[in-house]
Image (cartoon, rainbow, N blue to C red):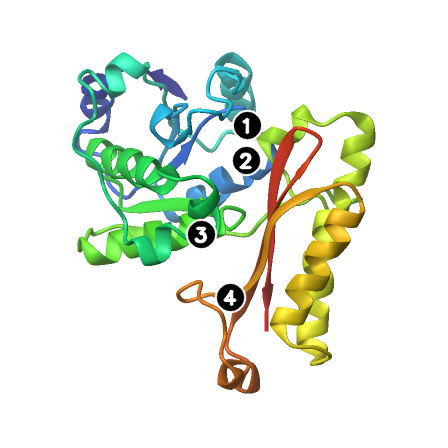
Amino acid sequence: MKVVHTIEALQEELKGKKNIALVPTMGNLHEGHLHLMQEAGKYGDTVVASIFVNRLQFGPNEDFDQYPRTLEEDCRKLEEQGVVDYVFAPSEKDMYPQPQTFRVKPDPALADILEGFYRPGFFEGVCTVVMKLFCIVRPDVAVFGKKDYQQLTLIKEMVSQFGMPIRIVPAELQRNQETGLALSSRNRYLSAQELEDATLLYKTVKGVKDALEAETADPDVLEERAMKMLDGHGWIPDYVAVVRRSDLLAPTKDDLVKRTPLVVLAAAKIGTTRLIDNVEVF
């Protein structure tokens, strides 16, 4: 495995390489990230993992400066796993030598709802850095986790609309096997008690899924009940939403009758840490 810090050096290394798979990350890698690498190894002959904390996707009151930067530890984990061939770890100056005034502005109908409503500009920052990574690496395959479900949906749409010759591979959300808590870099911000309490978020979205599949209530009622449950246990919920997987819009009665593929998405803050989770339905 080779660690590369500049665009020019990476592109030189990748000359002549075939079937390249890319896994974009912001580092602070955990088992969920390593699962993405494992998936990339199934589809690519050359695997590139990028590690870059992207300022463009952080709001003015978010944790850009505090976001953990653990490059040495990340590289050790990737080396031990033995899947990644190149780690692309550019500095901000390398990635954005001039202010990034050209941005990818995603469709507001998809980008300004759910996460985008609570984090204005977030998906513009995500899509811009991913587009830039695609231009730098020119992968044949890119792997994104289902944990960031709305992000995955937007990236797939961006690739489709721009006609980019890149296969987007969704990787299943990884959980703590004992508690069900979705693996996340932000879990390290949680106290021991908060880690224990954080399992309620998964139990909540799972409860909505189970009720939908048992046809015991309509989505609006389930969403309201889930929000009240989280609020009643000390959380500050942003949303619990039942939406279609295809376009992240609320399902119609016909969708429920036909059992159109849905997903339950949730975001809530416990203590000072904001967590997201989701489960697919049908």
Disc 3 target residue: 150
In this view, the residue in front, 136 or 232, is 232
Q: Which of the image's four quarters has the C terminus? A: bottom right
Residue 243 numbered mark, or none: 4
Q: Amino acid at mark 3?
A: Gln
Residue 244 seen by the camera = yes
SS of the residue under disc 1: loop
- The answer to whether the residue labelled 1 contacts the one labelled 2, judged by CB atoms less than 8 Å apart, is yes
Q: Amino acid at mark 2?
A: Leu
**Mark 2 to mark 4 CA distance (whole Å):** 28 Å
Residue 34 numbered mark, or none: 2
Which tag, 1 or 2, sits closer to the chain's start?
1
In this rendering, which labeled residue sits more in front, label 2 or label 4? Answer: 4
**Mark 1 to mark 2 CA distance (whole Å):** 7 Å
Q: Amino acid at mark 4?
A: Val
- The answer to whether the residue labelled 1 contacts the one labelled 4, judged by CB atoms less than 8 Å apart, is no
Which tag, 3 or 4, sits closer to the chain's start?
3
